[in-house]
Image (tube, rainbow, N blue to C red):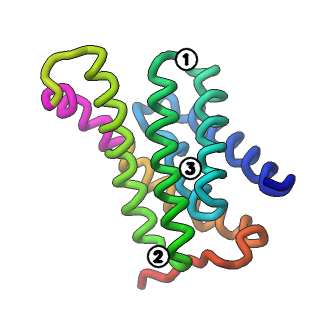
Amino acid sequence: MNTYKLTLLALLAALAVVGRSAFAFLPNVQPVTSLIIICGFILGPVASIVLTFLTTFLSNMLLGMGIWTVWQVVSWGLIGIFSGLLGKFFKNVPLFIIVVFAVFSGYFYGFVISLTTYSIAGGNFFAYYLAGLPFDSYHAIGNGVFMVLLYPVISHFFKKYANNRFTIQNTN
C-alpha cells in the first residue's frame, strides 16, 4: 500500500468518524457503511478492511467501546469485502445498483449485529430481530441517501487513483 492510498484511507476515515459523530443524534443514520462501500468499489477489498478498522475503533473511542465493536468490524468488514469484489469484477456499475447494494447492506449489518446480540441476550430471535427492523430501515435508507450524495463526489476526486476505471452511468 503506497503513501497516496494511505492518504486516501486517512481522509475517508476522518470523514467517516466525523460523519458518524455528527449524525449520532439520529438512530442508525450514519455515513460509515456508504463510505466503506465506496472505498471497496474504488480502492479494493483490502483498503475497505483497513477503513473498517480505523473507522470503527476511532469512532467508538468517541461514542463508546464495547463487545459490539468486534461485531461492527465483522459486519462492516464483510460489506467492504463484498463491495471490493464487486468493484474488482464489474468496472462500470450504475449508481442505481450501488444504491441498492447500500440499502441491502444496511439490513445485512443489522442482521449480523442482531445475531450476535441475540446470542448474548437469548430469547426468541425473530421477535428480537423484528423489534430492531425499524432501526435497520433507518440505516438502510440513510445508506441510500448518503450513497447518492457521496459516491459521485468521492469517485470524482478519486478518479486519479482509480485510473478512470469507475464511471457513473446515467440512469435516465
Where 108 falls versus 39 (above or below)?
above
| Residue at image coords 31%, 35% | 135
What amino acid is at disc 2?
Answer: Pro
Residue 3: x and y, percent? 86, 53
Residue beneath disc 1: 64
Residue 124 x %, y %:
13, 23
How far apart are labels 3 and 1 at the CA level?
A: 20 Å
Q: Amino acid at mark 3?
A: Ile
Q: Position of residue 91 (x, y in %)?
A: 56, 77
**SS at mark 2?**
loop
Task: List the residue tagged with mark 2.
Answer: 94
Look at the image and say whether residue 129 sits in the magenta stretch.
yes
Give the side of residue 57 with respect to residue 80, left or right.
right
Report x, y in % for residue 72.
47, 32
The mark nearer the N terminus, 3 or 2, is: 3
| Of 24 and 2, the residue lying toward us | 2
**Which stretch appears magenta?**
126-138
Callout 1 crowding tier (Cα within 10 Å): few <14, some 14–19, many ≥20: few
Q: Quadrant of residue 64?
A: top right
Residue 128 seen by the camera: yes
